[in-house]
């Protein structure tokens, strides 16, 4: 079944760490061709090297800030040139993984920082829209393509301190549904993959580099790994072209809900 992804172009945003980096390795292992974007170029280069070692036919990197429209435009200018060299198809991009995003802070609304709210909506919501708009011309006309948007259990459930992040991931859900309606008939599938607690750099970023606070999130729990989530992405993208996995929620066994977590401490 993974043959379906062999030689296919896969574009991953936020590929410098966590889910995006693991996805680069996982799609690499099934022989895909990769276009990887994020702000930290050195980290992207390292990820591309590990993806090539895993089996990627090609892995290319370029700086990308999804909060900035010109950065997205210049990334796609670069991507179009890269795609042009590896394929004869007019719509060469097979898989788009809208993964770049994250949370900032865990403050209640009363103490919330507007800059944090803006960043969360810029990355998780507007960034996804910018990237998708730029990617669609490279996907339409080639039935069988897949867009996987990375949502979260935070888009399904609310928790204190999560107003902007829960709101942004709920918006991701609705955008996914809208896109699926708009693209119905094009053959392009639109999916959302919504993980629960996973140990990546997510909490380190949320708590502004406070390692102790980030570690506390996973104390006594066996969280998901980035590889668990990447495996789900490859599975979703490798279904036959008439099958669309609309939505998938993936959580650690220890997490029954955002408020019900089994801790061995
Ligand atoms: P990481 O912090 O490890 O990875 C986040 C990635 O997003 C990095 O590669 C980062 O790259 C990139 N990114 C952040 N801001 C931008 C930007 N402005 N432009 C381009 N890239 C950006 O966290 P995860 O891997 O866990 O997060 C990936 C996605 O999964 C996010 O959307 C997150 O909300 C979601 N998620 C995470 C869960 C978890 O528990 N870990 C659970 C559910 C969903 P760089 O800094 O180099 O730009
Ligand atoms: C990340 C999972 O529960 O911290 O999206 O919001 S959670």
Image (cartoon, rainbow, N blue to C red):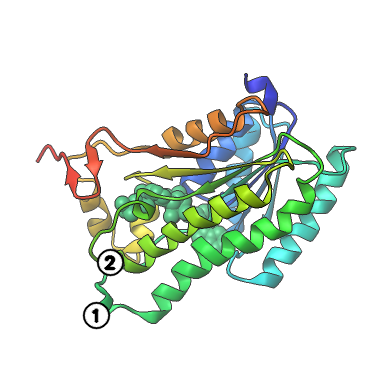
Query: Where is residue 218 shown, x and y percent of the image?
Result: 24, 46
Secondary structure under the numbered disc 2 in the rendered image: loop
Work out which residue is located at the far right of the displayed protein and give it.
88
Secondary structure under the numbered disc 1 in the rendered image: helix
Label 2 within 8 A of ligand 2 by Cβ = no
Query: Where is residue 244 shown, x and y percent of the image?
Result: 58, 34
- Which quadrant of the structure image shows residue 251? top left
Query: Where is residue 20 shown, x and y percent of the image?
Result: 53, 46
- Which quadrant of the structure image shows residue 55? top right
**Dot 1: few (<14), some (14–19), or many (≥20) neighbours within 10 Å?**
few
Query: Where is residue 246 shown, x and y percent of the image?
Result: 52, 39
Q: Decide if residue 262 is on the left or right side of residue 17.
A: left
Q: Decide if residue 88 is on the left or right side of residue 33.
A: right
Q: Nearer the viewer, residue 5 or 60?
A: 5
Query: Is 26 above or below relative to 65?
Result: above
- What residue do we see at 73% from left, 52% from top? 136
Query: Residue at label 2?
Result: 106
**Dot 2: few (<14), some (14–19), or many (≥20) neighbours within 10 Å?**
some
Q: Which mark is residue 110?
A: 1
- What residue do we see at 38% from left, 54% from top? 155
Quadrant in which the C terminus appears: top left
Q: Is residue 14 visible?
A: no
Asked if the residues shown at circle 2 and circle 1 are in contact, with their CB atoms under 8 angstroms apart, the answer is no
- What residue do we see at 45% from left, 50% from top? 151
Quadrant in which the N terminus appears: top right
Q: Which mark is residue 162?
A: none
Query: Is 196 above or below relative to 73?
Result: above
- What residue do we see at 48% from left, 53% from top? 173
């Amino acid at each position: 079944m993974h043959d379906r992804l062999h030689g296919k172009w896969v574009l991953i945003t936020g590929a410098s760490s966590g889910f995006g980096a693991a996805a680069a390795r996982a799609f690499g292992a099934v022989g895909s061709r990769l276009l990887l974007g994020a702000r930290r170029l050195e980290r992207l280069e390292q990820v591309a090297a590990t993806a090539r070692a895993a089996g990627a036919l090609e892995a290319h990197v370029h700086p990308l800030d999804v909060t900035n429209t010109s950065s997205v435009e210049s990334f796609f200018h670069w991507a179009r040139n890269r795609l042009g060299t590896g394929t004869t198809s007019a719509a060469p991009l097979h898989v788009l993984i809208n993964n770049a995003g994250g949370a900032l802070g865990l403050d209640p609304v009363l103490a919330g920082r507007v800059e944090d709210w803006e960043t969360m909506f810029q990355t998780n919501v507007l960034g996804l829209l910018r990237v998708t708009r730029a990617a669609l011309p490279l996907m339409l006309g080639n039935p069988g393509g897949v867009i996987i948007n990375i949502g979260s259990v935070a888009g399904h459930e609310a928790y204190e301190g999560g107003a902007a992040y829960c709101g942004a991931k709920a918006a991701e859900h609705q955008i996914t549904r809208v896109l699926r309606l708009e693209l119905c008939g094009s053959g392009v599938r639109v999916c959302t993959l919504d993980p629960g607690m996973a140990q990546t750099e997510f909490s380190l970023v949320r708590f502004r580099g406070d390692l102790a606070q980030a570690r506390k999130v996973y104390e006594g729990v066996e969280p998901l790994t980035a590889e668990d989530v990447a495996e789900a992405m490859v599975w979703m993208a490798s279904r036959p072209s008439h099958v669309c996995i609309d939505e998938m929620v993936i959580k650690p066994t220890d997490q029954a809900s955002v408020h019900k977590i089994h801790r061995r401490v």
